[in-house]
Amino acid sequence: MNIIFALLCIIATASQAGAWGEEGHRGIAEAVQGHLQAATVTAIAKIAGTGDDLPPGTLARLSVWPDQIRALTKNPHAAITGFSPAEMEEARQFVAAHPDNTNWHFVDLPPGSAHYPDLTHPDPTDPALPFTNPTDIVHMIHRSVDILEGRTESAMFTQLQALRWLLHLSEDIHQPLHVASGYYSTAADTLSHPTMLTDPSEVTAQHGKNDRGGNVLLFLANPTCPTKPTHENLHAIWDNCLVDVVGGSRGCGSKTTDKTVAHVANHLKMRMQEPASQAFRLQGDYHQWPEQWATDSVHAAAAGVFPSELDSGCVILDSKRPHPPVHVQSRVVAPATKRAYLQEHKADADRQLTKAAVRLADLLNHIQWKE
């Protein structure tokens, strides 16, 4: 491992897992379930143990499992609401076997990356390559497909678990801040006006420090440094608030319910039927679609997902990790308010949610399910 790559491994860290939040994940999955071919329904029902059909909400329930088990990474003795004793035991065994599973939900590409690297024929000179890793979101989608198609076996990774992760990560990858992270150059502890580094070569050369996929870009008037985790951050707005707005809410909803999920699902079902949404479908070998999805999402991030102006920047350490990485926390100045940001990016979120639904349905219908 070269020195630059080692440094990047230290500074590149997790965006908060859970893109789109529960409402977004369930809404996408419920919309997708109505667009599955008969053979796909049969294959998934066999894995899910629901007979020959998929009762309403089956994919939605499966899609949130990777987020539900996160509680066990912090506390192995935690209880998960709605899990039976057998389901709790399965979850605990999975987390024990894969303690790094919270890192599977993302990849932190600089927003100026031209593409997610070609995994089939990797170019060692590709400036984006050092920002990828064997357990990032693209790699783990591939692993899930391989298991479901019977091309690889894993004693600690069942077909049902692979299905859950495939659903979840295929949704996550369309949230731009689960593919892109802002990077900043600083040798000081404070930055009055942080300026983002977008070119991956420049980030590497300057050992840029990231903002955890927008998790520490804060919509707060006078944030302290470091600020305790708060939902008033850019990443959370994409995970939750924008989903609420797309679903018909005027702002950030306080609680996910079957009704709010239905609003999102019904909206996406309608969008999936629109002729314009067919342009979101990809051609060619579906085994290479995850790289294309990631490339599309990093381009979406570069097109304006990040705030146009920041101030009150400071350098913080993530004390939860054995080798604390460095991040840059900042206050969002423009847009001036969270409400303004929501209005500016509602259409962007709508587009990304629709892409996730169209493309996930397409992938599930293409997979050659293991008999």
Image (cartoon, rainbow, N blue to C red):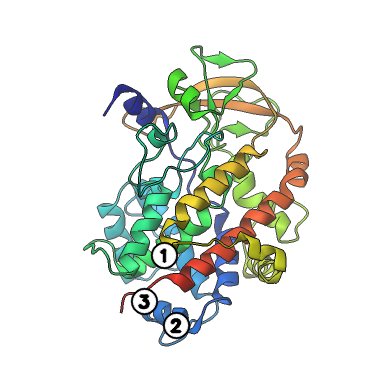
Rounded to the nearest angstrom, the CA distance separating label 3 from label 1 is 10 Å
Residue count near mark 1 (Cα–Cα under 10 Å), binned few <14, some 14–19, many ≥20: many
Q: Quadrant of residue 356?
A: bottom right
Q: How many marks?
A: 3
Answer with mark 3 or mark 1, whichever residue precedes in sequence. 3
Q: Which residue is mark 1?
A: 164
Q: Which residue is mark 3?
A: 47
Q: Is residue 135 left or right of residue 334?
A: left
Residue 74 vertical position relative to residue 63 in the rendered view, above or below: above
Residue at the image position 73 percent from the left and 52 percent from the top:
347
Asked if residue 172 is positioned above or below residue 14 in the image, the reply reads below
Q: Residue under label 2, please give it.
A: 39
Q: Identify residue type, mark 3.
A: Ile
Kindly identify the residue that appears in the image at 36 percent across and 31 percent down.
Answer: 9
Instruction: Specify whether 180 is left or right of 69.
Output: right
Q: Residues within 10 Å of mark 2 (few under 14, many from 20)?
A: few
